[in-house]
């Protein structure tokens, strides 16, 4: 067990808030650092302490590390919209790369021993084969992927020079919500397919846009590996325990289920779960979108005792829908 607290950056956001829940449920003490630009203070479980500041504010971040006896960091803070990264790349190099460099420097200065990084399958770019393994080439095709890969490289170099180890978890498509209804995806203007679809199912949108029908996939729409956010949060807890058990080793692990669903298949699942037909509008491809991204997840299954508990597309959709309905009741 970790001797000290865990700092979760971006812990008021979608994935971060679920990781906070998983850590607290596992008995860890948690302090959250979030500037609340895209996160929500109400999304942070009351068992954790929330410090409202930017991860690049080295003075306040280091003071928090020191004052709370932080021994591990889970780093979720950053920008995540692929098309926006193409139109505004400097925002992504600032929020994802430069801010991460600042946080890593703070961690080294304060003697933080373990660092978990929220990375992405976008680091692979357009894969040469499917499913994608961790050792496959990393040639990102958009600034989002490049900004994340740069942070992975900084962590590798830092771990080689300082007494800190890390795990970069490369997420595939994260969806769903906490089964107990404690958190979910709440940001306005979300671009994630399942979030958009359940918004349409609850009359927050008139339709779902399908970007691209001419990909080299069975039905022409993009194929993605969807992982339930609660399974992903559980993987972070297991990865933290791995880092604590062997401080000399670092890891890069895919987080996915190892199978993909097309956009049309996902929307078919939403239609099944909601018992309605959501309008689909077929449009051109978005910049920076590869045809298919599916994880080879054998490495994470071998490295961790983690096993998916909610590996079912209809279940993922049902949990996302339940959260969306809860949000609708609150407004």
Image: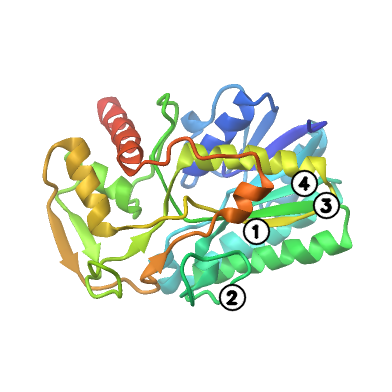
Residue 291 position in % (x across, y down): 36, 71
Residue 114, label in figure: 4
Q: Nearer the viewer, mark 3 or mark 1?
A: 3
Q: Is residue 164 above or below residue 292?
A: above
Rendered image: mark on residue 30: none
Left or right of 215? Residue 159 is right
* Cβ atoms at labels 3 and 1 below 8 Å apart: no
User: Which quadrant is the C terminus positioned in?
Assistant: top left
Mark 3 and mark 1: span between their CA atoms? 18 Å
Check whether the beta carbons of the residues at disc 1 and disc 2 lie within 8 A of each other: no
Find out whether the residues at labels 3 and 4 contact each other: C-beta distance under 8 Å.
yes
Query: Of label 2 and label 4, which has the lower sequence position?
Result: 4
Q: Are marks 3 and 2 in contact (CB under 8 Å)?
A: no
Residue 210 visible in the picture: yes
Give me the residue at 14% from left, 48% from top: 278
Q: Earlier in the sequence, mark 3 or mark 2?
A: 2
Q: For label 1, count other residues whose C-alpha is less than 10 Å away and answer few (under 14), some (14-19) or many (20+).
A: many
What is the secondary structure assignment of the residue under circle 3? loop
Report which quarter residue 181 is drawn in.
top left
Dot 1 corresponds to which residue?
99
Mark 3 → mark 2, Cα distance in angstroms: 25 Å
Mark 3 burial class by Cα count in 10 Å: few <14, some 14-19, many 20+: many
252 or 141, nearer to the observer: 252
The numbered mark, 1 or 4, whose residue comes first in the sequence reads 1
Residue 63 seen in the current view: no
Q: Which residue lies under the disc numbered 2?
A: 137
Gap in angstroms between the C-alphas marked 1 and 2: 25 Å
> On the rendered image, what quadrant is the N terminus found in?
top right
Say which mark, if any, is on residue 164: 3
Helix, strand or loop status at disc 2: loop
Task: Give residue 52's position: percent from left, percent from top.
Answer: 60, 38
Q: Which circle, 1 or 4, is nearer the viewer?
A: 4
């Amino acid at each position: 067990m970790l001797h000290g607290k865990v700092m979760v950056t971006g812990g008021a956001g979608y994935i971060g808030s679920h990781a906070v829940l998983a850590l607290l449920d596992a008995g860890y003490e948690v302090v959250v650092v979030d500037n609340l630009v895209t996160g929500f203070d109400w999304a942070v479980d009351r068992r954790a302490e929330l410090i409202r500041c930017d991860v690049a504010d080295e003075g306040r971040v280091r003071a928090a590390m020191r004052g709370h006896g932080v021994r591990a960091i889970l780093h979720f803070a950053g920008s995540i919209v692929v098309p926006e990264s193409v139109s505004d790349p400097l925002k992504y190099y600032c929020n994802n790369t430069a801010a991460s460099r600042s946080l890593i420097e703070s961690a080294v200065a304060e003697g933080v021993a373990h660092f978990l990084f929220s990375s992405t399958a976008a680091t692979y770019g357009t894969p040469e084969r499917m499913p994608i393994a961790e050792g496959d080439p990393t040639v990102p095709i958009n600034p989002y992927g490049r900004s994340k890969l740069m942070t992975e490289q900084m962590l590798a170099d830092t771990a080689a020079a300082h007494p800190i180890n890390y795990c970069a978890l490369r997420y595939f498509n994260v969806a769903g919500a906490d089964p107990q209804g404690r958190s979910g995806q709440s940001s306005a203007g979300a671009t994630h397919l399942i979030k958009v679809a359940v918004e349409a199912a609850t009359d927050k949108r008139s339709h779902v846009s399908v970007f691209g029908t001419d990909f080299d996939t069975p039905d022409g729409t993009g194929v993605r590996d969807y992982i339930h956010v609660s399974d992903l949060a559980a993987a972070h807890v297991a990865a933290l325990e791995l880092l604590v058990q062997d401080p000399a080793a670092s890891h890069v692990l895919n987080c996915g289920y190892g199978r993909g669903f097309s956009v049309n298949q996902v929307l078919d699942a939403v239609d099944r779960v909601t018992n309605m037909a959501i309008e689909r509008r077929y449009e051109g491809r978005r910049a920076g979108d590869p045809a298919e991204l599916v994880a080879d997840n054998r490495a994470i299954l071998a490295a961790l005792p983690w096993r998916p508990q909610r590996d079912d597309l209809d279940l993922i959709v049902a949990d996302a829908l339940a959260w969306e309905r809860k949000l609708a009741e609150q407004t």
